[in-house]
Structure formats: structure tokens, C-alpha cells
Amino acid sequence: MDKKVLLELTTDIVSAHASVNEMGKEELLEELQAVFQKLLNLAGPEGEEGVATSQELKPAVPVNKAFGADTVVCLVCGKGFTTLKKHIAVSHQMTPKEYRKAFGIPTKTPLVARKYSEAKRKIAKDKGLAGKLAEGRRKRAAAKK
């Protein structure tokens, strides 16, 4: 199946979903990527023009050297990033699950640089987001009773 057809199908599916569900910009982009990837996988080998299979993928750098403090190196192309999720979806049409499987990366290994993760954790802690989340969940649970 032609990628143009897959793209049209993706926009039809996501627009139908977005018409009945409120979605933010990031959610919409993630939904587009996920639906396109699923359709691409369902299309089979003829729909995967130029997409490497897991047997063809050889890491660009050793897996243990890819996860640094400041950057995470994409094992497909060898470029360094702070986070990999969007890059592998857009550039390599892979989900994080497929990426991990292709290179034998444990599911608990984050696809982000350690310093980035620590900075985000510190911001969340400083803003008290965990407490706010817990309070919101308590309020929702109380409202359901």
C-alpha cells in the first residue's frame, strides 16, 4: 500500500477520533504517529518501503554507550538527542516498544538522557506535582462515591 494512502487513512481515522474526544496538540501528534505506524505495520512488506526490519538493524554505537548523562544516541542513525521517542517515530517509523525489541533494550531503560530526566523530576518536585496529583485523585474518588 502506498504511504500516501496510509497517510490519508491516518488523517481520516484520527480526525474521526478527535471529533468525539478532546485532544491536545501533543496527544493529536502522538495519535497520528501511532495510527500511521499501526497502518504501516498492517500493510505488510509492500507497505514498508525503505523501513528496516529488526533483523537488518545493527546498532550505530554499542548499546551500553548509547545512554549517556547529557544525550541518548539513536542506535539506528547514530545521532544524539535528549529524548528519542519523537525522533524514532518520525525518522525511523518505530514505536519505543519496537525500538527496544530491535536492540534488546530493557523496558525499564528510559529513552531519555539522565540529566534531562533528573531536571524534569526536580521541576515536578519543586512544583509539588505529586501532591497535586494525589489530591486530584482523592477528589475524583470522593466524587464517584
Image: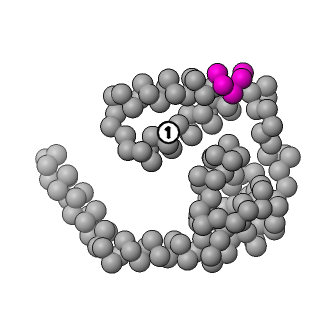
* Residue 23 position by quadrant: top left
- Place of residue 115 in the rendered image (x, y in percent of width and height, measured from the top left): 55, 77
Q: Inspect the image, locate mark 1, and give the three-letter code of the amino acid beneath it.
A: Glu
Indicate the secondary structure of the residue bearing disc 1: helix
Asked if one can make out residue 94 in the rendered structure from this viewpoint, the answer is: no
- Place of residue 143 in the rendered image (x, y in percent of width and height, measured from the top left): 14, 49
Asked if residue 53 lies left or right of residue 143, the reply is right
Residue name at image x 67 percent, y 75 percent = 68
- Place of residue 53 in the rendered image (x, y in percent of width and height, measured from the top left): 80, 42
Q: Identify the magenta region.
A: 1-5
Other residues around mark 1 within 10 Å, as few (<14) / some (14–19) / many (≥20): many
Residue name at image x 29 percent, y 73 percent = 128
Looking at this view, is 21 or 138 the one in front?
21
Looking at this view, is 92 or 54 the one in front?
92
Q: Is residue 96 magenta?
A: no
Residue name at image x 52 percent, y 28 percent = 11
Identify the residue under disc 1.
Answer: 31
